[in-house]
Image (cartoon, helix red, strand yellow):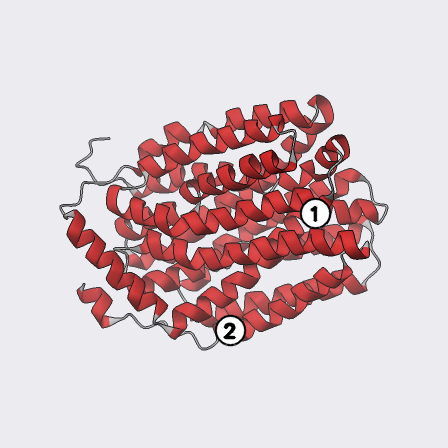
Amino acid sequence: MNPSQRPSAAQILLCGAAIVSLAMGIRHGFGLWLQPVTLERGWTREDFALALAVQNLAWGAFGPLTGLWADRVGAVRPVLLGALLYALGLIGMSAADSVWAFVLAGGLLIGAAQSGTTYAVVYGVIGRQLDPARRSWAMGVVASAGSFGQFALLPLEHQLIEHFGWQPSLWIVAGLVLLMIPATLGLREPARATTQAVTLRSAKLALDEALGSPSFRWLMAGYFVCGFQLSFIGVHLPSYLKDQGLPAQVGSYALALIGLTNIVGSYAAGQLGQRWPKRYLLAGIYSARALALTAFLLLPLTPASTYVFAAAMGLLWLSTVPPTNATVAQIFGVANLSMLGGLVFFSHQVGSFTGVWLGGWLFERTGSYQLVWWIAVGLGLAAALANLPVREQPLARTQAA
């Protein structure tokens, strides 16, 4: 594609979906490595959880900076660098012979990589290049792709570990990550004739507006809970089920089923975000999560009940992503959408850090995940309330800027 040409909607959606599908599909499978890695290395679950907690925190911390870079130069270079760091981190995980080397590779490197290969960067292109009337829908399509990656790649990762062992399987997955590189061709954008000084002034204004907005802070609070719930479940659910005596494949199938049903959930959330007030949609999603978690904990645990829970959670899994990012775009505009999307996502990743690490920390001290499950229920109800005060009207100053 010529750099002066505007990318087509189909190019943006197909290539953005491919990148997010690979990044998120691989990410959601890391819990499958918990037991093989800790058993062979002699580490605790808290050690493994620390690496993934750092990964989530690094992803969030790098997110606003990577988003600012993407807003200035487009998505191609951030995605290219992210893909290379992702592959390097996976290879480093396979070679790490100490906890801190594992934390560096699986935590810091992959966290930085994910900031350039996931939603904030791709959503920035969508916000700038697609009609606002289709924005929430398009974000739902890309979120669905992330869920499809989870559905497609988790069984593959499980089979790789079973047949080749955990270390060679990380090398194979590292090769899959590099498929993101040709997909960047569909994210090239026309050059924007703005100076660095103007861009930085615009970014600072947008940052001041966002942090000074109660609505933005409420969105961040809700997103913290989203990160807590998803990362705790994604990392610890397979081990929780094995601890309860269920076969190992139940955990991988449950996570894959979450990905399958969230294809529907994410797309539906994007569609509904075009029609309903997004604050009510988000409040409903968080309330439904709390209900699904409660039912899972109170009913007898069987493979069937696990799959029902996974299907229900899947409908709600990434369905917060389109309405949250579309609300940010609606309030603050799209000129700095990748940066602001990365900033609100930082709160999500602080929640992810907390959920992953707390799950491992409490398990090592109590021998059970029960307390963390109930914390996730309470936080879901709190997030439902947190989204109700959000005001979705555009800020006039941001639009003028």
Q: Secondary structure at mark 1?
A: helix
Q: Quick one: which residue is furthest to the bottom in this view?
A: 389
Q: Is residue 175 visible?
A: yes
Give the x, y percent position of residue 382.
Answer: 58, 72
Q: Secondary structure at mark 2?
A: helix
Of the numbered discs in the image, which one, if any, rests on residue 46?
A: 1
Left or right? Give the position of 61 relative to 106: left
Give the amino acid at mark 2.
Ala
Which residue is nearer to you in this view: 396 or 36?
36
- The structure residue drawn at horizontal position 25% and vertical position 55%, both measured from the top left corner, is 335
Give the x, y percent position of residue 26.
Answer: 56, 37
Viewer-side label of 2, 1 = 1
Occupied quadrant, residue 44: top right
260 vs 186: above or below: below
Of the numbered discs in the image, which one, if any, rests on residue 344?
A: none
Q: Which residue is under mark 2?
A: 386
